[in-house]
Image (cartoon, rainbow, N blue to C red):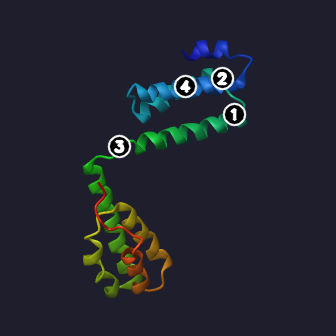
Amino acid sequence: MAHLAAVETRNNRLQRKQQKMNLVRRLYQQGFEREDVLNLLAFVDWVLTLPIDLEQEFQREVEQLEAELRMQYVTSFERSGIRLGLLKGISLGLKLKFGESGQNLLSEIQSIQDVSVLEAILEGIDTVGSVSQLRQIYLSPTTDTQPEI
């Protein structure tokens, strides 16, 4: 397919980029893992060469496609793992920045199920100046600490 696309798009580099993107999209749709797609992409790159500006555009489109595919569905096991990882990071951050007073917040924070709130807390550890400012992040009325459905 790549060779056929190369012949068909010999004089139209923009169309060649689209054909190259279509091939990558099809590989993912067929269920190929990222590593397999990258291995096949080495061949596709060799056959469907692009000028540097279109190659950079192509790379951005592939990154966007991969991000969309990663976000399609996160299993409950993955969500749990993400949450636990965030809690570990928060625990370490609290300990390093605030010492024992930061660790006292951990029991409150562990009850939060919403990953986006936990991400905000982790980011907040770096920017806030006190434990009370950090508490405002997750106690604020605009923050929903209920489990996501």
Numbered disc total: 4
Q: Which residue is mark 3?
A: 73
- Hey, which quadrant is residue 11 in on the image? top right
Q: Say above or below: 126 vs 113.
A: below
Q: Which residue is mark 4?
A: 22
> Considering only order in the chain, which callout, 2 or 4, is on the residue closer to the N terminus?
2
Mark nearer the viewer, 4 or 1: 4
Rendered image: mark on residue 54? 1
Determine the residue positioned at 57% across, 28% down. 21
Q: Amino acid at mark 3?
A: Tyr
Determine the residue positioned at 43% across, 34% down. 35
SS label for mark 3: loop
Disc 4 versus disc 1: distance between alpha carbons?
A: 15 Å
> Considering only order in the chain, which callout, 1 or 4, is on the residue closer to the N terminus?
4
Mark nearer the viewer, 4 or 3: 3
Disc 4 versus disc 3: distance between alpha carbons?
A: 22 Å
Label pair 4/1, CB-CB below 8 angstroms: no
Q: Amino acid at mark 1?
A: Leu
Disc 3 versus disc 1: distance between alpha carbons?
A: 30 Å
Label pair 1/2, CB-CB below 8 angstroms: yes
Estimate the x, y position of residue 101 in percent, counting from the top left: 33, 87
Q: Amino acid at mark 4?
A: Asn
> Considering only order in the chain, which callout, 1 or 3, is on the residue closer to the N terminus?
1
SS label for mark 1: helix
Q: Which residue is mark 2?
A: 16
> Considering only order in the chain, which callout, 3 or 4, is on the residue closer to the N terminus?
4
